[in-house]
Image (spheres, helix red, strand yellow):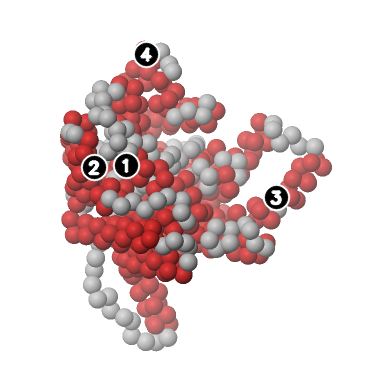
């Protein structure tokens, strides 16, 4: 059930209406049933996996609660919980990857390859709910939270439908505590105008990003990346820049719709994106991009490895390993691993040269607060992310290297003026709509960056006529120019495959 499907547009209002009118003792059971129905709409057979992961981590939490201290027994409980959950994730997500690499080695050695014993479909959202459940187990082990004794409350935490299949990856301190508060609260007001209006506006903005921008850019990006060997420098760079906006709008739109849907029901989810392309360094970029995943890897992998508390060499190794794992988390392919490795190298080089760059700027008398300097930092950071994104979007490692080679060896500056860019999948009208939508995206991003306010917060302080004007514009774009309908196949959100 996609957020932008007719099924969800019927499902969500029904869930919200019933949630508000039923007694508070039944609210958790209703949301849990709705969440499992939402997940079963993808593949009913995979429901057993999320239920199994839920029970394993819940029982682990209870057992940890009985341990008086973080001793040997507690460590073994955590280890068993991690091994069981990661084994399921590795089996479904990485079995084909491992088998392919084993067969590659066997082929080079002149040995018969291993035949694939069976086929299966990757369960939607398995990477997200597995990490969320494991985060709970580790939080209990660290005494950051108390074990949740009620299985239904904990099951809702793992399966809460707005953020279930593509994040944000919630923390138990945030979402679980809100779920625990449901039984304590009075009947939620059905017509809490400010909260509901704010949540619906976030959802509207998410639909705009997905249907008007991301899915329209997808046509252009797929056209060029699908036959990259026919194009030159201009088209390839333009497609990569377009993909940077596409993946941002696609993933940020899911998180924004999830935040809005949760807010309508009175829940606050973690912010997952904060204008990442305004970042002035790669390190800052990872504090703004997929924030929940970055924070998860920092707290549950980088710091346990030793973080920055050890020597320089070990610290750099910890950084590199963390980003390698991050790349592998995004996909079972070497080009994703390479993407993670590139970002790891960026971080290491940035850390190693920090003092040198600071000294050079000081000697040169550069004003680091000047707009020109900050703009230059942002531009360099964006170019670095574009280079890495080639490996993320390419179909394989060989394709990525071939793609980059053509950028540097097939210059075609005339493509900027001869109309070539207008013949790559999008008609003139589509380009005009896209250009207008990107202006709106830029304005909203500037508000978020320099006013430090999300769109719903910003509009709440504006005049009524202006607020409704923005709503009408967004709704009109979605209704008139959204990429949906009988002649258009709904594009799943990109991160569903992860």
Q: CA distance from mark 2 to mark 4?
A: 36 Å
Of the residues tagged 2 and 4, which is closer to the observer? Answer: 2
Say which label, 2 or 3, has the lower sequence index.
2
Tell me where residue 162 appears, x and y as whole percent: 30, 42
Q: Secondary structure at mark 1?
A: helix
Q: Secondary structure at mark 3?
A: helix
Examine the image and state in which quarter residue 378 appears.
top right
Q: Nearer the viewer, residue 32 or 365?
A: 32
Tell me where residue 484 appears, x and y as whole percent: 24, 37
Q: Which residue is mark 4?
A: 464
Circles 2 and 1, Cβ within 8 Å, touching? The answer is yes
Q: Please name the residue shown 39% across and 83% down the image.
A: 106
Q: Please name the residue shown 37% across and 36% down the image.
A: 268
Say which label, 2 or 1, has the lower sequence index.
2
Q: Which mark is residue 179?
A: 1
Q: CA distance from mark 2 to mark 3?
A: 50 Å
Q: Please name the residue shown 26% across and 52% down the image.
A: 151
Quadrant of the rendering where the C terminus is positioned: bottom left
Q: Which residue is mark 2?
A: 28
Say which label, 2 or 4, has the lower sequence index.
2
């Amino acid at each position: 059930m996609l957020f932008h499907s007719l099924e969800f547009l019927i499902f969500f209002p029904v869930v919200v209406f019933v949630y508000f009118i039923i007694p508070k003792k039944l609210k958790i059971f209703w949301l849990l049933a709705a969440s499992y129905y939402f997940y079963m709409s993808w593949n009913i057979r995979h429901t057993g996996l999320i239920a199994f992961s839920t029970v394993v981590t819940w029982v682990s939490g209870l057992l940890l609660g009985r341990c008086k201290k973080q001793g040997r027994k507690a460590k073994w409980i955590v280890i068993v919980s991690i091994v069981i959950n990661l084994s399921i994730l590795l089996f479904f997500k990485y079995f084909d990857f491992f088998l392919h690499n084993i067969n590659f080695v066997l082929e080079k050695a002149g040995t018969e390859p291993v035949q694939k014993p069976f086929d299966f479909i990757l369960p939607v959202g398995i990477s997200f709910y597995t990490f969320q459940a494991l985060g709970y187990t580790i939080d209990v082990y660290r005494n950051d939270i108390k074990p949740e004794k009620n299985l239904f409350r904990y099951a809702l935490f793992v399966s809460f439908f707005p953020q279930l299949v593509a994040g944000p990856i919630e923390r138990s301190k945030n979402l679980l505590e809100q779920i625990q508060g449901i039984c304590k609260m009075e009947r939620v007001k059905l017509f809490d105008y400010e909260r509901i209006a704010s949540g619906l506006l976030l959802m509207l903005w998410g639909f705009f990003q997905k249907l008007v921008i991301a899915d329209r850019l997808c046509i252009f990006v797929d056209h060029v990346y699908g036959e990259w060997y026919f194009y030159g420098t201009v088209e390839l760079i333009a497609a990569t820049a377009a993909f940077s906006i596409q993946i941002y709008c696609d993933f940020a739109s899911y998180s924004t719709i999830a935040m809005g849907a949760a807010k309508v029901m009175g829940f606050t989810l973690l912010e997952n994106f904060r204008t990442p392309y305004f970042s002035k360094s790669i390190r800052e970029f990872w504090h703004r991009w997929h924030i929940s995943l970055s924070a998860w890897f920092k707290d549950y992998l980088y710091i346990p490895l030793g973080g920055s508390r050890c020597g320089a060499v070990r610290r750099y190794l910890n950084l590199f390993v963390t980003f390698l794992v991050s790349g592998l988390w995004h996909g079972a392919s070497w080009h994703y691993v390479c993407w993670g490795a590139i970002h790891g190298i960026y971080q290491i080089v940035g850390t190693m040269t920090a003092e040198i760059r600071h000294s050079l700027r000081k000697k040169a008398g550069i004003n680091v607060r000047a707009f020109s300097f900050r703009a230059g930092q942002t531009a360099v950071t964006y170019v670095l992310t574009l280079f890495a994104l080639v490996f993320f979007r390419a179909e394989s490692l060989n394709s990525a290297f071939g793609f980059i080679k053509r950028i540097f060896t097939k210059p075609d500056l005339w493509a900027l003026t001869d109309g070539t860019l207008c013949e790559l999948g999008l008609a003139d009208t589509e380009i005009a709509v896209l250009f207008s939508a990107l202006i709106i995206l830029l304005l909203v991003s500037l508000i978020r960056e320099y006013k430090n306010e999300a769109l719903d917060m910003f509009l709440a302080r504006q005049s009524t006529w202006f607020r409704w004007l923005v709503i009408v514009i967004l709704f009109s774009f979605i209704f008139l120019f959204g990429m949906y309908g009988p002649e258009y196949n709904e594009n799943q959100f990109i991160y569903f495959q992860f």
